[in-house]
Image (cartoon, grey):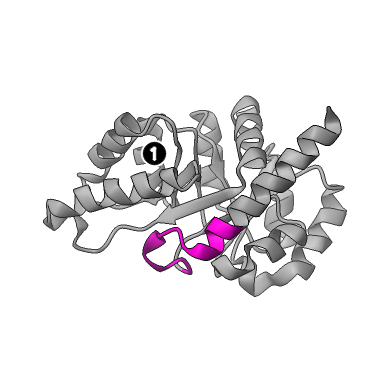
Amino acid sequence: MKNTQRNLINSLSYSPLIIVIRLENDFFDTPKNRDKLFLKIKNITNSGFKHIEIAWDSNREWINLIHEIKTNFEYINLGVASVSSFKALDSVIKLDLNYSMSPTFNKEIHLKAIKHNQLLIPGISNIEDLTEALNLGYKIIKIFPAAKLGFSFLKKIKKLTKNEIFFIGAGGIKSTDVKQWIENGYNALALGRELPNQKINSNLERWLEEYKICRSHAINEIK
């Protein structure tokens, strides 16, 4: 799991936004929904974003859908969101994806994920769960719900972890505030419900352009 975590951290350090897509309740009832989803993913990647998560779904067709996405979009870093049960984890293990995320921390589920070498990033909202997750060897943590916990919680735990942990903010983050969240210490962000229809809007386009410029300047300074 150590190398998997490092690879994801490196990838998110280069492109720190994750777009989370949740399927409609009737998604698998209408064949056209698949085409719409693929077009959405294509538009997201064409806009310059490479990290996409598809929320887990209990429908038996969900695994086949993820296989199709994985095959058709080999250049994206595909993950699974909302993995909070053993059933969901079992589905993810079969897919051999780079990572998945949980909204909470359930030690037994995470122990099983580690046993199967599946990176299941824990969602943390308190110090006790953070300590447990770190003891299991996690170097990348999701703070959820970030909007509710605020910047003060992140600053507090950064002091405890001596800035050695990669933190992803998720939950209630709006596209208008991406720059602010990054500037206040988050290493990466996951945007889902606050991003209407998971479409890349002008706020994210402007942020991406500014981010590319800043990254280019930083690289030139190193050279």
Name the element at disc 1. Answer: helix
Q: Residue 147 sits in which quadrant?
A: bottom right
Residue plotted at (56% across, 39% down): 111
In the displayed structure image, the side of residue 132 where residue 91 appears, left or right: left
Horizontal and vertical percent for residue 58? Answer: 27, 52
Residue lying farthest to the bottom in this orientation: 148
From the image, tell me which residue sits under label 1. 92
In the displayed structure image, the side of residue 127 where residue 59 appears, left or right: left
The secondary structure making up most of the magenta span is helix
Residue plotted at (67% across, 40% down): 13
Q: Is residue 150 magenta?
A: no
Q: Which quarter of the image is occupied by the C terminus?
A: top right
Q: Is residue 30 visible?
A: yes
Horizontal and vertical percent for residue 110? Answer: 55, 43
Part of the protein shown in magenta: 194-206
Q: Amino acid at mark 1?
A: Val
Q: Is residue 203 magenta?
A: yes
Q: Which quarter of the image is occupied by the N terminus?
A: top right
Residue plotted at (69% across, 46% down): 213
Q: Is residue 173 visible?
A: no
